[in-house]
Amino acid sequence: MIKLETSGSRVPKNRLTHSQKKLSGKITELNSLLGSRNYSDDSCSILLPDEPLFNSQSKALARKLGRPSLLIDIGIGGSSLGTMAVCDAVLGKNYNLHSPQTRVLFADTCDPDLLYSISSIARSVSDSGGKVALNLISKGGTTVESIANFGLLSSSLSCPEIAVT
């Protein structure tokens, strides 16, 4: 069940009440979706955390990939922005600058300079014995830019680990 938790928010009560009223319809809609498990709804991604098959497949993929030296997230728009937002929130904007065990790069545009840079970094990691994982994210599976970026990056590496989500 989804509910708006406001205790300790330090937001004035009158502003909270206004926001709660604005959000109440959407919260009711999402709670209804949780009950119906309707995967044709635009908000169906909210169902995924409780999906046993999805959870077991995700855990199996994580075990298979292990801890790559470099993770390249390939997606356009929302397919990349969600991962980017989580990384920024959990790891911080400058995460890659602190020599982490796994660096994360985003191939979220068809900019040739960016793709050349990412490809060069990936080849360097791979050539030095590091594992490179490509994570292709596409809601419909037909996003031309994502498919092109994936093709370019996967062909530039001898043996990338690949995950398609």
Image: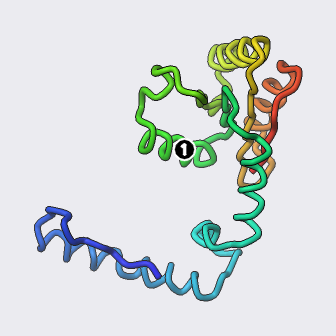
Residue 93: quarter of image: top left
Q: Residue at x 75, y 34 (%)?
A: 134
Q: Position of residue 36 (x, y in %)?
A: 63, 87
- Identify the coloring: rainbow
Q: Is residue 73 above or below residue 70?
A: below
Q: Residue at x 61, y 67 (%)?
A: 49
Q: Nearer the viewer, residue 112 or 98?
A: 98
Q: Position of residue 73 (x, y in %)?
A: 66, 36
Q: Left or right: 27 with respect to 163?
A: left
Q: Position of residue 89 (x, y in %)?
A: 42, 44
Q: Position of residue 162 (x, y in %)?
A: 81, 38
Numbered label tally:
1
Instruction: Provide the secondary structure element on which disc 1 rests.
Output: helix
Q: Nearer the viewer, residue 53 or 112?
A: 53
Q: Residue at x 70, y 32 (%)?
A: 68
- The kind of residue tagged 1 is Leu
Q: Residue at x 54, y 44 (%)?
A: 81
Identify the residue position indicated by label 1 in the image: 81
Label 1: few (<14), some or many (≥20) within 10 Å? some
Q: Left or right: 12 with respect to 104?
A: left
Q: Is residue 86 above or below residue 159?
A: below
Q: Is residue 136 above or below residue 8?
A: above
